[in-house]
Amino acid sequence: MRRYAIRRSLTVVPVLLGVSLLVFSFVHLIPGDPALTMLGERATPEKVAEVRVRLGLDRPIWQQYVLYVGKVLQGDLGVSIVRGDPVATDLLRRFPATVELAISAIVVAIAFGIPIGVASAVWRNSLVDSLARLGALTGVSMPIFWLGLVLAWFFGVQLRVLPTGFRLESGTTLVPWTNFVVLDAALQRDWSALVDALRHLVLPALALATIPLAIIARMTRASMLEVLSREYIRTAEAKGLSRSAVIVRHALRNALLPVLTVIGLQVGHLLAGAILTETIFSWPGIGLWVYESIESRDYAIVQGVSLFIAVIVVGVNLLTDVLYAAVDPRIKYE
């Protein structure tokens, strides 16, 4: 197992190098002078020259790449062109908001997706199965931006029962210890702030959880149907075990192995794909930050966040592969 984990980790190295090369090429793929594009057409020649020197654009391309990789390995993702702040500092400050939203969304997706998939497989070709498959198909096909607007309009504007933006009410005073609002409120025993933070999480988490919920439900159903047709399930039933014991103890435990891979992949996608959800609900995470940076042509932030997200996705996929090998005793690695 240790040997497999090491070998699998080594395969990540060329992937990360390729990602760094693509992200590095992002600035150079911008039409015209990247420095002029970042500063705008009204920038003075002196300012353009200053930015070119700061970014190393006055050097040969291979030296620029080596310099870029060296800075990244030291934790330097560049400096914001608009504000002048280090990208890494702002990234670490905003990333907890995205993690909090992604964790909430995946919890909702797992809590509803697995039971729906199990029920759909157990009562195959019934009304429950038909409704579950229809709901899963709708969830996969539904655009997040449309669903987010509908949820905000219905629960926030019409019913006025849930907030439609930000992480806390403007008058809430909470000392940021970890920048995870829910965790900070719990650690400080500020129960009113905790309730307020959870209320603000509901709508964006539901909107973001829709697609992974549908995918998990469909994968659970397919895996359960395959497991329920195995001989050891019929043997367990012949031994006189109850239907619930057969489903939970024998079928579900084995059916969840491929679902684990899907969940791991969805976690990476949620961390990387929350831009629309955060923009709609004004959630101050890296998704909204990237959207605002694109509008202001702050490509240094876009470049740094793109590399950071790529590393997170690769790391989550690696962890998923290792966990899958650890929980499935049938897999043997040389």
Image (cartoon, helix red, strand yellow):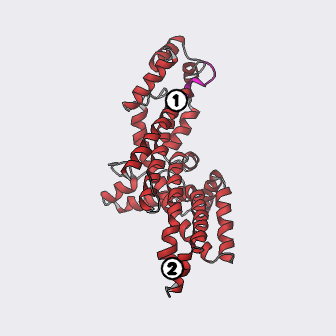
Q: Specify whether 177 is left or right of 320.
A: left
Q: Nearer the viewer, residue 303 or 231?
A: 231
Q: Is residue 41 above or below residue 223?
A: above
Are there few (<14), some (14-19), or many (20+) residues within 10 Å of tag 1?
some
Q: Residue 241, relative to residue 199: is it above or below?
A: below
Q: Earlier along the polypeptide chain: callout 1 or callout 2?
A: 1
Residue 27 colored magenta? yes
The residue that appears at 46% across and 38% down in the rendered structure is: 308
**Which residue corresponds to the image point at 42% horizontal and 37% vertical from the top-left?**
90
- Using the rendered image of the protein, determine whether residue 308 is visible from the camera's viewpoint: yes
Q: Nearer the viewer, mark 1 or mark 2?
A: 2
Neighbour class for label 2 at 10 Å: few (<14), some, many (≥20)? some
Residue 41 occupies which quadrant of the picture? top right
Task: Please name the residue that numbered disc 1 is placed on.
Answer: 21
> In the rendering, at what x and y percent does residue 91 appear?
43, 39
> For residue 65, which numbered disc appears in the image?
none
Secondary element at tag 1: helix
> Which residues are the magenta region?
26-32
Determine if residue 108 is in view. Answer: no
Residue 291 falls within the magenta-colored stretch:
no
Q: Find the residue positioned furthest to the bottom.
A: 240
State the image coordinates of residue 313 (x, y, percent, origin top left): 49, 45
